[in-house]
Amino acid sequence: MLALYRCLLRLYPAAHRQEYGEEMADVFCELQTEVRSETGGQRFWPRATFFLREFAGLLSGALYEHSRAITGSDLSFPSRRFTMRSEFRFPNATPILMAVILAGVILAIEKATAIEQSFPLAYPQQLPPIQPEHFTFFPAMAVIFLSAYAAAVIGWALLFAMRRSGMHRLSEMPPVQTQK
């Protein structure tokens, strides 16, 4: 099967095959050994599905690479359901939205704490009014953030003093000669 796989690797463009061909064959060989050891070499269907999946992936990958070589851009095929893309990023509003949600959760916890503290431990005949909440979480968070900021400033100062911050290396670089 490895010989057939190596033959089918020739379907890829030459540049891609030269760069990744040996690695793809090695990975196929390792996976084939793993499937044989898991199935004991006796079960037909797990091995057949493995070979079908690998050869289908090889054929669709070759088609994808050829289209990419011809057009010069990445085209996604609908048959590739689980394509990982390195350019995926969270939207810019995500940190802001997460901070708003965290603030809402913190305010809900503070309000629940105020409600809990306004009730007496015994069962009262008449419920007293709910006392206004006392924000204890925000001052504690401010202290935590300020101490983390102070630790970061102290760490940067130590790195700067030991000439490891990168600023010294940038100042020691020769200027770039521009052509006019």
Image (cartoon, rainbow, N blue to C red):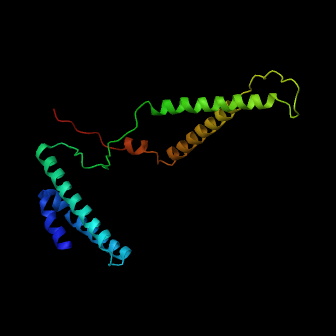
Q: Which residue is painted at 74% across and 32% down in the image?
A: 113
Picture coordinates of residue 38, whole percent (x, y): 38, 73
Quadrant position of residue 177? top left
Q: Quadrant of the N terminus?
A: bottom left
Give the left or right position of residue 118, taking residue 57 as reference.
right
Q: Which residue is painted at 71% across and 31% down in the image?
A: 112
Quadrant position of residue 99? top right
Picture coordinates of residue 48, whole percent (x, y): 26, 68
Q: Which residue is painted at 86% across and 23% down in the image?
A: 126
Give the left or right position of residue 15, taking residue 83 as reference.
left
Residue 31 shows in the view:
no
Give the answer, above or below, for where 21 lies relative to 180: below
Picture coordinates of residue 103, whole percent (x, y): 59, 30
Give the left or right position of residue 116, taking residue 73 as reference.
right
Give the left or right position of residue 169, taking residue 150 as reference.
left
Give the answer, above or below, for where 175 lies relative to 83: above
Front residue of 123 and 8: 123
Residue 152 shows in the view:
yes
Give the answer, above or below, for where 168 lies relative to 35: above
Q: Which residue is painted at 18% across and 68% down in the image?
A: 5
Front residue of 170 and 110: 110
Front residue of 7 and 72: 7
